[in-house]
Amino acid sequence: MKRRDFLVTAWQGMGAIIAAGTGFIGLRYLVSQNEESTSGGVVTAGAVEKFASGTVTPLPEAKCYLVRNAEGGFLALYRQCTHLSCMVIWERNQFQCPCHGSAFTLAGKVISPPASRPLTRLAVQIENGQVRIDTGKQIKRTKTTAEDFVYPPEQTA
């Protein structure tokens, strides 16, 4: 085999490998986007007492994090970054996007770009002492407010 023939074959092989890898990555991205968009039911997270104040609980079945702030209010944050839809993780007291470095507060407010808007929240209801999340009601926000949190009704004795 001549050197020229070898180099042509090698370049063609590398091109095929790159094309296959790119196609695989693209297919995985499309499938994951499709999986994330399948929502629309009400998920019961559990009893109000189950969630301590100041905690963040991942709820895979609702594709969100359930936040309970220090004052006892609840907030459900969709787990996709608002920049390019990567899955955020709760780490070091903030939500972090592993893809491009965006960071968000406990309430979903952007503290580190490139994301430009807060994390999307899901509707939360408290009924009969149970926290329920409506995954079909995604609320895209331009800012975070104290009204984003839902508080349990006061218990009367």
Image: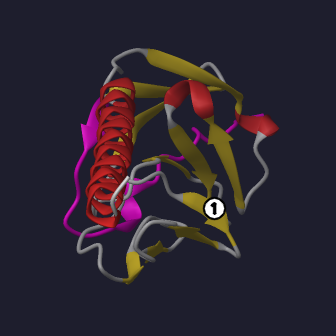
Instruction: Identify the residue at the far top of this view.
Output: 41
Residue 155 counted in the magenta span? yes
Asked whether 48 or 59 is in front, the reply is 59
Q: Quadrant of the C terminus?
A: top right
Give the image quarter of residue 118.
Answer: bottom left
Give the image quarter of residue 95.
Answer: bottom right
- Magenta span: chief secondary structure: loop
Q: Is residue 121 left or right of residue 132?
A: left
In the rendered image, is residue 37 in sight? yes
Going 44% across and 66% down the picture, which residue do you hit? 99
Asked whether 12 or 68 is in front, the reply is 12
Q: Is residue 53 left or right of residue 43?
A: right
Q: Is residue 124 left or right of residue 126?
A: left
Query: Picture coordinates of residue 64 (x, y %)?
Result: 51, 41
Going 67% across and 74% down the picture, which residue do you hit? 93
Query: Picture coordinates of residue 59 (x, y %)?
Result: 62, 35
Going 33% across and 18% down the picture, which residue do you hit? 40
Q: Which amino acid, by three-letter code, is at mark 1?
A: Trp
Query: Picture coordinates of residue 90 (x, y %)?
Result: 63, 61
Residue 88 counted in the magenta span? no
Q: Is residue 8 above or below residue 146?
A: above
The residue that mark 1 highlights is 90
In the rendered image, is residue 126 in sight? no
Asked whether 129 or 46 is in front, the reply is 46
Q: Which residues are magenta?
A: 137-157
The number of numbered badges drawn on the structure is 1
Q: Is residue 40 above or below residue 100?
A: above
Query: Picture coordinates of residue 128 (x, y %)?
Result: 62, 19
Instruction: State how the image is colored.
Output: secondary structure
Q: Secondary structure at mark 1?
A: strand
Q: Is residue 42 above or below residue 73?
A: above
